[in-house]
Amino acid sequence: MPGFPKDDALLTSKWLRFTGIGGDRIVASCLEINRAGSYYTVYLGFSYPTTESVTPATGTAYANAINCYYYSMIISVALCPGGFYIYNPASHPHANLVFATYHYECNPDSCGPLAECSGSGGCICVSGYRIPSGYLPTPESYGCVDIDECKETAGICGPYSNCTNTPGSYLCACLVGFKATDPVSRPGSSNICIDMDECLDNVCGDGGTCLNNIGSFVCNCHEGYQLLPDATPLCQDIDECFNSTVCGPESICTNTPGAYTCACQLGFSPTKPDQEPSETNICIDVDECVIYTTICGPDANCTNSYGSYTCTCLSGYRLNNPGVIASITNPCTDIDECSETPGICGKLTVCTNVPGKFYCSCPDGFFPSTGVVWEMGVSFCQRIQDILDAIKPPKGQTKERAFLGNMDEQLQNNTGVVLPQATVTNSFSASMEVSGVGPRARSITVSSEGDGETGSVILDISDRLVAAMVPQTQNQTRIAVQTPTVDLSLHAIGPGSRDDNNVALSAKGQTMEINLQALASTNNGSAAAAFMTLNGMESLLSHQYFKTENTTEMFSDVFTAIIPTINTTNLTEPVNFTIQHKKVPESGIVTCVYWKEQSKEEAMQWSVEGCWVAFSDENYTVCSCSHLSTFALIMQIGEPPPDNPFLDWLNRMCVIVGLFFLALAIFTFILCSWNPKINNTARLHLCLNLFFTHLLLLWNDKYVDQKLACKVMAGLLHFLVIAGFVWMLLEALQLHLLVRRLSKVQVIQRDGLPRPFLYLIGYGVPFVIVGVSALIYSDGYGATEAKVCWLSRQRNFSWALTGPVIVILGLNWILFCATLWSLRPTLVNMKSDVSQSKDTRLILFKIVAQFVILGCTWILGLYQTNLFFQVLFIILNSQQGTFLYIVHCLLNKEVREEYVKWLTCSFNKPKEGGSVKDAPSVSEDWDKAE
């Protein structure tokens, strides 16, 4: 310090008191040299007095030089009141000798600013401070100044750090990108800074890739992200949608992390729907009305607008919630004009509300002034009698027919009009009332013969009325109408219908089954059928229009089947009608008929053409018809002509006689079948088939009630009858071949065709005919209307027998004529020694016999109009077996010889005069001369 070394010589022989920052007592122990501002420091060599006294304690003080006792002096010490000591040194033994003092009690301010007591009571600068070199302390301060450790001690903080000096201290901080080895402690030389891996803290975020370096790192941001140094994390998403047209017009851009999505605004869609909208694939308006056909709900019109659409209820509809656009959840509902506006149609009218509109019509007994079509504000209801009174009919026509004609003409001129049920029923009621029939007729003016012309007109009107009430439908619609005048059931299907194929309709207990799907398949997927009855129609279309010799009676209600807009002249499938009987039938024949309109060739009538009875019992009958189109189907009962007991008796007796001779002929042909000269194959099987045919015919009325047995019997009879005719044809063919050989004067061997060929033709042809017939219409076999097991007349099934028989009879007639043509010259040549009269009689008899045998007498079946032809037909056809036995057995010489042998039991005895002569059986039939 300045003035070093100091010297306290001036303090000798004076009473001294030490105060201030230097201390308050002289030290009592030896100190090293160079302390207290000089070379040598004085210390007391004795103990301080402990009691106050005016008499001081005197002792020796020493100064350390070479040793602690090197210099000595006498000094007095007294304890003063207040607890402080005073000193009086008696001498000063050496220069550069000073008193060293200390603080007996250390207080915070004992040493002055920036200094503090040491453990020995001395003062030192606080940590981080020191007395600067060359500074002389003052009574107020030691002059402690801050130590700049960062400058004085290089590397005090260790590597990768910054040192910052502070008053009395310093701070160490790791460089950016580094951290203390022990993060809890401050960095320094003992807690050095090491590299910090920022990537572990995901400093770049999910939008980038972090690469760590010594003391730093690098963020590589992904596509759609950008580096923002002040952001956390550093890689921040780029908002492509901000102030951008990246999605194009009429679109919504939604920013997403690292990307963005584009969507069209409501009411728009991308030009290319399978791609997101963009500046090149812009959003265009969506026509919701086309894409979402039901967006407005039912009964509403949809109008497209740019980016949106509007819904407007159809006329006659309104919204339940007008504040919300029409939709499936807020549909347009029908306005019931009839209930909201009473009297909207006028007085004495019937208002019918239907979805979207309403109709006006008249009650029964009245009719619109404008006809069937109602005109709002013009039409009103008039009494039917008033309308008739006002009509001026053309000459030769009644007012009633003029009324019906006007109605029919108006319907024809308004084919597109839709009529409600009330109008249709009112029109039916008016039609029947003016015709003088039905429940509203004041009196029945139609005679028992009926009025077919008026009935036909009403049927035409019915067609058009039903067509006018058929609704347009996508799926299916059923309508049922029941009034005292009409009972109507209508079923309509559309392209969307998945209804069953067969639809059942009913009217007044009658039912109709029809395949609507089959009709719809040929009519763009749509079809409709109606089934109805009109009360009183049976009086107009009287049963007397049925042309028959029998007594007739209307046996059911008249019903009409209508298929609007479709030609049903020939249906692909027959329609079945189940018709209830008006009463239980006692006798007669139930017949299914339809009303046949008048034509140039025929008058109007009930006809059975195309209709047949499929089933019948005492309560109902099932009729099948192959055509419809406004035809009425009825049932009538006709009494057949009474049976003739004589003809029944004659037929039974003749059949029994024929069976007897057929049995004899069969026995004879079997007996003679071993003779190689005689070929009886054709005539044997002809007799067998005729025998079983006549036998079954005697019993074919016994199994009518047994369905299966009756079918089997009818099929077997069919087979036997055709087989009999085929064997007749084969017999005729063999006879013709024999005559041709006789005409050439050939040596006659065993006659006839090979047996396998005969069997194949004789039984193969009938088997094929019966088999094909059964496959086509198996129900054709069974009980008939005549109560026998035979072939049905329905669907012309009787042609399964009539056709083959006509063909065989025609061939037999041709062969018969050809045989006669070749026979006459041959017989003349071979019988020149016989008289002409005998020859003529024999030939005439055998010609007649062959005519019967070959079945040509069946031609007489066409002439059954009187008793003579009936008796002749019974005798000739039942005696085929008799003629076969006479011609081929009794008149055959070889057969007679066999009879003789059999009767005389001489089968094994040879006849005198040689063996039997070679002469075929058929040659004997023509009386060949010996």
Image (cartoon, grey):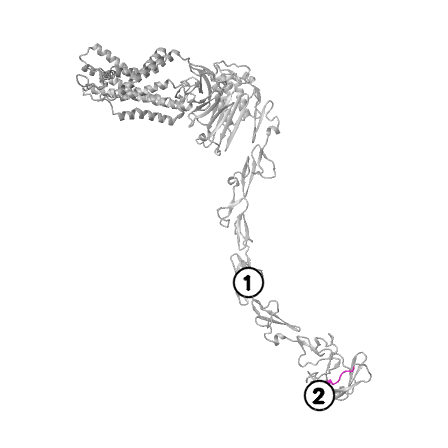
Disc 2 crowd rating (10 Å Cα; few below 14, some 14-19, many 20+) is some
**Depth order, front residue of 370/331:** 331
Separation of marks 1 and 2 at Cα, in angstroms: 70 Å
For the residues bearing labels 1 and 2, Cβ distance under 8 angstroms:
no
Magenta-drawn segment:
42-49
**The image quarter in which residue 377 lies:** top right
Q: Which amino acid does label 1 sit on?
A: Leu
Q: Mark on residue 69?
A: 2
The residue most toward the right is: 54
Q: Mark on residue 200?
A: 1
Q: What residue type is labelled 2?
A: Tyr
Residue 68 % position (x, y): 70, 86
Q: Mark on residue 152?
A: none
Residue 191 % position (x, y): 59, 71
> Sequence-wise, which precedes: disc 1 or disc 2?
2
**Position of the C terminus by quadrant:** top left
Q: Is-magenta flag for residue 767?
A: no
From the viewer's perspective, tell me whether residue 190 is left or right of residue 593. right
From the viewer's perspective, tell me whether residue 302 is left or right of residue 900. right
Residue 343 % position (x, y): 61, 25
Disc 1 crowd rating (10 Å Cα; few below 14, some 14-19, many 20+) is few
Regarding mark 2 in the picture, which secondary structure is present there?
A: loop
